């Protein structure tokens, strides 16, 4: 038999023939592998309510959301953009029923979402060849990777107890950049040995429990006047140091909050110089930022891989996302 004829099928035939010729007396078979439990698959996404258009907007096709007319239950949610609008088109009849057709005006950063590098263009880039890719330019490898889990929820909860478990102004509950109630350098160092190429570093803060009273817009306890936990400036600097020392590039960061940045670092309401350091420093390096995550505690219960189901729309710089994790152990 020529080597190019030695296909897997041929190998199987030869193997069967050899066993038969030996009367089944070949090498003992390997012990059966111990059955493994199937991985747990989790949805890390919040549901987004869609609203019908305002009545006076339907005629001129402006499609402004009428928050008093949810399309199917639900409520307004926090966000930097308008609420999602569902436009219903006439049914299309067929011999066995009708086809339902809708159009959705869905802001890129509403609800559980992912930012690509194109979402933020820094005035003075820190790297010689800054990433500028949009959503449609990201690869499967950009949107998939192992999870490095950080849990600061106990510290956040202890701070919230100062206000009976609820968010409050900075004079009552402190989630400022320099406080211990955010992701710190020590938190990064504690997981540094697991940070590898294409990792997603995900912070569980416990803040998503306020999602149910999150809006509208930037109102409510979820945003809390821009006093909420996230990744501190120093933690971001440490991650960048780790990347440089190891010659790696993480896939990005995520948090169960409206932003991966500490709220104070938005410099709200003006968004002046130095605002959003995770966005300004991370996105130009190709990080993807995952915001408004749900069910993040599950990521601490095993070895997890993250899958970001982002829209593949040309010209898009961010996307509503259905984010899943598969965890073993």
Image (cartoon, rainbow, N blue to C red):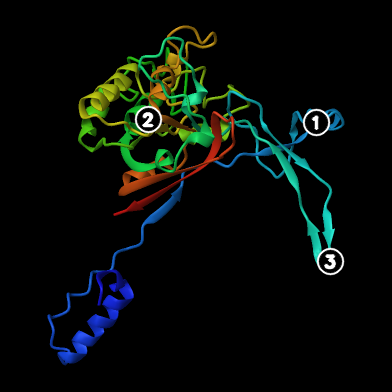
Image quarter of the C terminus: bottom left
The circle drawn on residue 95 is 3
Dot 2 falls on a residue whose secondary structure is helix
Dot 2 or dot 1, earlier in sequence: 1
Residue 20: x %, y % from top left: 21, 90
Which circle's residue, 3 or 1, is located before the other in the chain?
A: 1
Tell which tag, 2 or 1, sits nearer the viewer. Answer: 1
Q: Earlier in the sequence, mark 3 or mark 2?
A: 3
Label 3 vs label 2, nearer the camera: 3
Residue occupying the point 43% across, 29% down = 165
Q: Residue 244 versus residue 187: which sits nearer the camera?
A: 244
Question: Label 2: which residue?
Answer: 157
Q: Is residue 241 left or right of residue 116?
A: left
Residue 171, located in which quarter of the rendered image? top left
Residue 299, position as x, y percentages in the image: 36, 44
Cα separation, mark 2 vs mark 1, equals: 40 Å
Query: Label 3 to label 1, Cα distance in Å?
Result: 33 Å
**Figure check: 247 above or below 1:** above
Left/right placement of residue 107 relative to residue 259 reads: right
Q: Residues within 10 Å of mark 2 (few under 14, many from 20)?
A: some
Local SS, label 1: loop
Foreground mark, 3 or 1, reads 3
Q: Which residue sits at x=47%, y=36%?
A: 138
Q: How far is mark 3 from mark 2, CA to CA?
A: 58 Å
Tell me which corner region of the image, top left, top right, bottom left or bottom right, holds residue 248.
top left
> Which dot marks residue 54?
1
| Residue at x 42%, y 10% (from the top left corner) | 124
> Residue 88 occupies which quadrant of the picture?
top right
| Near-viewer residue (158 or 77) | 77
Vertical relation: 65 (above or below) 180: below
Of residues 128 and 171, the one drawn nearer to the viewer in this rendering: 128
**What is the quadrant of the N terminus in the image?**
bottom left
């Amino acid at each position: 038999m020529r080597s190019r004829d030695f296909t897997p099928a041929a190998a199987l035939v030869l193997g069967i023939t050899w066993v038969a010729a030996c009367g089944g007396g070949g090498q003992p078979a390997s012990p059966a592998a111990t059955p493994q439990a199937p991985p747990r698959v989790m949805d890390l996404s919040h549901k987004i309510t869609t609203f019908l258009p305002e009545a006076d907007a339907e005629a001129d096709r402006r499609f402004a959301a009428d928050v008093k007319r949810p399309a199917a239950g639900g409520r307004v949610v926090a966000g930097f953009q308008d609420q999602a609008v569902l436009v219903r088109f006439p049914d299309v009849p067929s011999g066995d029923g009708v086809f339902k057709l809708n159009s959705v005006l869905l802001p890129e950063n509403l609800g559980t979402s992912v930012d690509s590098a194109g979402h933020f263009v820094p005035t003075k880039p820190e790297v010689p060849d800054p990433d500028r890719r949009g959503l449609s330019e990201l690869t499967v490898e950009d949107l998939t990777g192992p999870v490095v889990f950080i849990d600061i929820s106990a510290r956040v909860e202890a701070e919230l107890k100062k206000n009976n478990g609820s968010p409050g102004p900075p004079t009552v509950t402190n989630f400022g950049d320099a406080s211990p109630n955010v992701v710190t350098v020590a938190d990064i160092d504690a997981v540094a040995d697991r940070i590898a190429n294409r990792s997603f570093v995900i912070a569980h803060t416990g803040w998503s429990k306020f999602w149910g009273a999150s809006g509208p817009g930037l109102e409510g306890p979820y945003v809390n006047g821009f006093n909420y936990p996230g990744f501190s400036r120093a933690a971001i600097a440490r991650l960048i140091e780790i990347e440089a020392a190891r010659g790696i590039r993480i896939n990005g960061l995520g948090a169960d909050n409206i932003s991966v940045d500490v709220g104070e670092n938005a410099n709200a309401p003006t968004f002046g110089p130095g605002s959003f350091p995770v966005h300004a420093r991370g996105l130009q390096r190709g990080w993807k930022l995952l915001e408004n995550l749900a069910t993040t505690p599950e990521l601490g219960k095993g070895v997890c891989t993250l899958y970001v189901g982002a829209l593949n729309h040309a010209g898009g710089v961010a996307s509503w996302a259905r984010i899943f994790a598969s965890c073993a152990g």
